[in-house]
Amino acid sequence: MSNSNFTRRGLLKTSSLAGAGLAMPTIFTASSVAAYTNEPDGSGVTLGFNVPQTGPYAEEGKDELRAQELAVEHLNGEGDGGMLNTFSSKALQGGGILGNKVSFVTGDTQTKSDAARASAKSMIEKDGAIMINGGSSSGVAVAVQGLCQDAGVIFMAGLTHSNDTTGKDKKANGFRHFFNAYMSGAALAPVLKNAYGSDRRAYHLTADYTWGWTQQESMQAATESMGWETANNVLTPLATTDFSSYIAPVLNSGADVLVLNHYGGNMVNSLTSAIQFGLRDKQVNGKQFEIVVPLYSELMAAGAGENIKGVLGSMNWNWQLPDEGTKAFVKSFGEKYGRPPSNSAQTCYAQTLLYADAAMRAGSFNPCAIVEALEGFEFDGLGNGPTLYRAADHQCFKDVLVVKGAENPTNEYDTLEIVEVTPRAQVEYAPDHPMFAGGELGKCNPGA
Amino acid sequence: MDALILQILNGLDKGSAYALIALGLTLIFGTLGVVNFAHGALFMIGSFCAVSLSKILNLSYVTLDETQTDFLGNPLKVKTPYVESIFGADLGASIIDWAVPLAILFSIPIMIAIGFIMERGLIKHFYKRPHADQILVTFGLAIVLQEIVKHYFGANPIPTPAPDVFKGSLDFGVLLGFDANAIIYPYWRLVYFGFAAVVISAVFAFLQFTTFGMVVRAGMADRETVGLLGININKRFTIMFGIAAAVAGLAGVMYAPINSPNYHMGMDFLVLSFVVVVVGGMGSLPGAVAAGFLLGILESFASMNEIKALIPGIDQIIIYVVAIIILLVRPRGLMGKAGMMED
């Protein structure tokens, strides 16, 4: 008579546990012996650059990738060092990160949330990326930030301007260097008041997705607080290419300012339509009709051509700034690529250096150590003046640029001119501000 | 009232683009029986003919201006177009300014050649294959063409302005007795509407009043009988493919100042143009044109704030709602032949 310990119930329990283990995504199990996800073994460290390489923002993605490659060069001690020479923290000396030579892999977000998550997941699981950086869309940033939180890696966002990224969708493993829609409104409103007066009626055309909504809400609140009225807000589908039927009713509405809460191709097309309809040549309510584009990028400004002349907007950074950090970065970038960097390139470059610096100061790649090093970190020398990575929401606070389309451009890169550098104090807000309400930062996740 | 007139005007220029693309699609379907999903790409290539000519006319030699510096602090490279050095500054600048209208002449031979190459090199091998195969191969071709354009021109829109003389807008309201600014309309969009009317009339006149057109129409009605008469109808149909490509290209050339050309613009128009063809009636040239204008105007009306307040989102679905209704109550389309799509 044999004496076996196997029972039917025990077999079922064991099988179900084994099955659950096998079914669990490798993202949560691959480095089960490591302290955290993709812990380097000392031979090198891999960063994942997730940018749009195809689709409508491919040119922006290309510029981000140029900056990220340059950052890796500088981290490894190659080239002229760029902003490492001007960065207030001196932890980075060009010897890689914590003795590890830095390499990188790239993914294509296609500016689609599902594609961006898939490419980030692939870089984390297959290539061992320890940090994900890049992107040109808030929808993508929110999606990838959520993935990185679950996977236990750090997400250093690229161009994402929606309040939600560090508002209701904020995550402990995610950090945003780029400014946001609230800051655009806070910086632009006083300039608009000075330029166009406080007795104005604004008509908003707004891209119908997360960024557009928060941008419109921020601009409406900021302009109404200085006395403007809001005549109308019309949501335009993201896929719209011909805005004529949305532009045509604007003059009949009694509005004397058109606010285009559009970005990228939407902005180029809606602004082109508005200029074609001669809006800026008209007088309404006894005043010159004006157009405002709250968020500018150099690449899209080039797409809009001479239509942007004199049109006010805001930016995170511009290559024409006079500070030493900007000069160093523009020199490195310009000599390598023959063109000045865009503001999305600068934010990706700065984010890569900030991650590396945090790892050096923490003495570890553990995401929780990185989070601790970045929270409340104050720094300077990366082109934006004195900057704070606020602990409460992982949003950077720094000066914001108000710019306008160049009136007399002297070359193809001279598309925008700086009107004002709005001081950081003017664009700050409380972490529990209603526009950022909801959501919890949560706890850092080291994965593994 | 003024808002209605404004939306009719808006619909006319949208409809012009739909009608021109749908006309070419119908020509190809009516003659060769091919469902050509690459037709939107031909519209896009037409726009890039305007971009290319503009770039050619702006080819420049470089001189260094020691008094100014570039972003790296080096002496500024000042570009002077060869056209200006050959024809003088004023005439040269005028030639560059008129790049888009000049691109009409530039694009016709290019588009006809592209049409021939597409038809002879690829599409003729799919004449006897099911429509699903034709759709797959032409859709694939469209993606290849747009990726080629993106490779050479980049993903960003490229501003291609109309001549200075057409900048600004006409105040229709004042002409019709309304208040100033009640009905304004850009000059170039009026030019586009007029241009579309001329091209559509020319295609109809060509088919109606020339021997070549008569043979093509006979071939569309009964290909076998025309063939039995000893006429090489396939050769004529190939030429019609080239003409259809040229019509799509011309629509694209003149559209360049309306929306800055980008590699994806063909896809934006393609699905809508197919809906136009279905609503107008597969194979019906007058149907394609009528449906193009009808749907353009309906789309404009649906974008009115008053309409959207009643039915949110109607501006995005109106064309498809009309298509569904037409397919349910009159599957052959507004002007399609009896029996077409009614089996």
Image: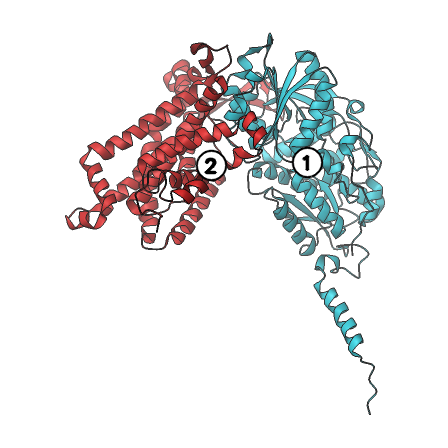
Chain colours: A cyan, B red
**Mark seen at residue B169:** none
**Mark seen at residue B319:** 2
Residue A67, placed above or below residue A98 = above
Residue B324, placed above or below residue A269 = below
Q: Position of residue B299 (x, y in %)?
A: 48, 31
Residue at screen point 61% across, 48% down: A115
Q: Is disc 1 placed on a helix, strand or loop?
A: loop
Residue matched to label 1: A160
Given the current orientation, which residue lies at the most extreme bottom position?
A: A1
Q: Quadrant of residue A302?
A: top right
Left or right? Give the position of A8 relative to B68: right
Q: Quadrant of residue A293?
A: top right
Residue at screen point 40% across, 17% down: B94
Residue A117, placed above or below residue A271 = below
Q: Residues within 10 Å of mark 1 (few under 14, many from 20)?
A: many
Q: Amino acid at mark 1?
A: Thr
Q: Is disc 2 placed on a helix, strand or loop?
A: helix
